[in-house]
Amino acid sequence: MRKNKWGAAAFSVALSVVVLAACTDAGTSESKTDPVAEPAKGGSNMNLTGMPIVKEPVTLTFFTGKSGNNGNNFAETLVWQQYRQKSNINVNFQLVPFENLTALRNLSLAGGDYPDAFYSARIGTADLLRYGSLGIFVKLNDFIDSYAPNFKKLLDKYPDLRKGLTMPDGGIYSFPSFYDPSFLSMLIGVPLWVKQEWLDKLGMKEPATTEEFYRYLKAVKEQDPNGNGIPDEIPYAGNGINPLIEQIRGAWGFGNRGVGHKYVDMDPDKPGELRFFRIDPKYKEVIDYMRRLYAEGLIDKEIFTIKTGALYAKGQQGIFGATINPNPVTQMSQNGYIGLGALKGPHGDQLYSQVKVPLVWPGAFVITNKNKYPEATVRWIDYFYGEEGATFFFMGMKGETYVETDNGKLEYIDQITKNPDGLTQDQALSKYVTWLGGSYPGYVQEKYFRGSESLPQSAAAAEKAKPHLIQELWYNFNFTEEENEFMSSVGSMIHSYISDMEVKFITGVEPMSEWDKYADTVQKMGLAEYMKVYKSAYERYIGKK
């Protein structure tokens, strides 16, 4: 029998155990505000338009994913203090570090101790369909039509957005994190950055090919470009190896439908035919290139273990020759890096495939069946998909956190961009807003977004990428329950095996001579059925089914 209220105490204990074991300096649950009297019916208490959303105050509890870039108490930030007063809705944000998010989210759902809504919870499409069909996640189609005018406009304007959110049963169960498809520097998101000062000192031009990039990294390692007489330079550093692989593989023509599809793209030699590219004979060269970089000490030895905060702290020393992140200025307080475009590979391929799907997190916000005020909650979240609410969410308050220039551009105040206490922009922003680290529900446009991706260096990197962008970007495919069962079992085993083997090849634990045996193993794990499932979802996506 399901409990009638979310077990906040049980959740806090579980969270404390995980956080103490895995991430001692991460965020914790917030202390709740004083309870308020709530009316019995949400509908009769709600205003259909304008603010406040409800006539008498109500309180909601949100399970909330938290980035390390954000502060430890959302309720104290400027945006949520102001919106609480404006809307008359008080939200208790139960903060869960992204590192522990999936496990604790699944625990709360499995035990029945789930909240009114999940916020920035990175819920995948399989879970949206599963819990939506069970009635645990509220079906939003009618609510959107009646109470979400801002979001409904986006669904009508961008058919791929509606298609990406609509599950095979016809239901929409979430509000997403959605980027304006024309905001290119946001979609390429995490460029490959190199240090211009070191290029100049080494007498090298900006790398345009994979071989030139290799030679630059090698020169950084061997020629002491910072001139301190100590071999402290790190040629390439990043958070995990996959971002670099995803940047590099376009130089061999792989990933031609964007990073939303990490295993399958379209075969350029067989029009209309899907390709599982991760075991393609030519893809072996991508992994071998990465092995070469690692073997020669051109990749940070901590690449597989370092956490984001530690990476950025190390980057603030100015010792990275190359890195991948939204922008070294905001993440590491480092000027002087330039973003590369698409590198040309050994066979002449030159494809910028590291392009995000605009529908970044389909399940960024979900309302559950324990919510007594679904209509008011829909109005609460819809505000952030409109011009006024989105500007407020990302920029804060005019005159307090940002100013409008004579040409109408919005800019953060100097206290944020040139913090007198030496804080990075993200650190200075954390007491005002909570979008840092991503995964938030909302609509991102260039006009009001002033994060890393909006800086001049990011815009310049996007311009370099533009001539070699992929021609067709796939949004996420939504699988049926039966297909999800296959993908979460056989598909998941295939993905895990590939990830493990790629690391072994790159680090030299497995010799590249074992590639054919590895590819054959993937085939035997059920790849033929995997591709049938993928093709079925693809045909629904393009409207053939």
Image (cartoon, grey):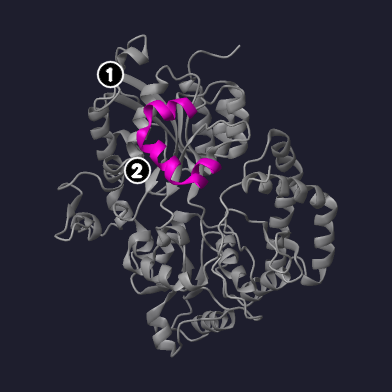
Q: Give x and y (percent) for residue 420.
A: 20, 59
Q: From the viewer's perspective, is the residue at label 2 or at label 1 nearer?
A: 1
| Secondary element at tag 1 | loop
Mark earlier in primary sequence (2, 1): 1
Does the magenta segment cover residue 146? yes
| Residue identified by numbered label 1 | 57
Q: Give x and y (percent) for residue 451.
A: 34, 56
Residue farthest bottom in this picture: 203
Type of the residue with mark 1: Pro
Q: Quadrant of residue 27?
A: top left
Depth check, front residue: 328 or 83: 83
- Mark 2 touches mark 1? (CB < 8 Å): no
- The residue positioned 42% from the left and 29% from the top of the image is 145
- The residue positioned 61% from the left and 23% from the top of the image is 134
Report the disc number at residue 434: 2
Residue farthest front in this picture: 544
- Tell me: residue 157, above or below residue 263: above
- The residue positioned 66% from the left and 76% from the top of the image is 292
Q: CA distance from mark 2 to mark 1?
A: 23 Å
Type of the residue with mark 2: Thr
Q: Give x and y (percent) for residue 424.
A: 31, 58
* Residue 247 visible at all: yes
Label total for image: 2
Q: Determine the main secondary structure of the stretch shown in magenta.
A: helix
Left or right of 11 on screen, residue 338: left
Q: Which residues are magenta?
A: 141-164
- The quadrant of the picture occupied by the C terminus is top right
* Residue 193 visible at all: no
- The residue positioned 49% from the left and 48% from the top of the image is 360
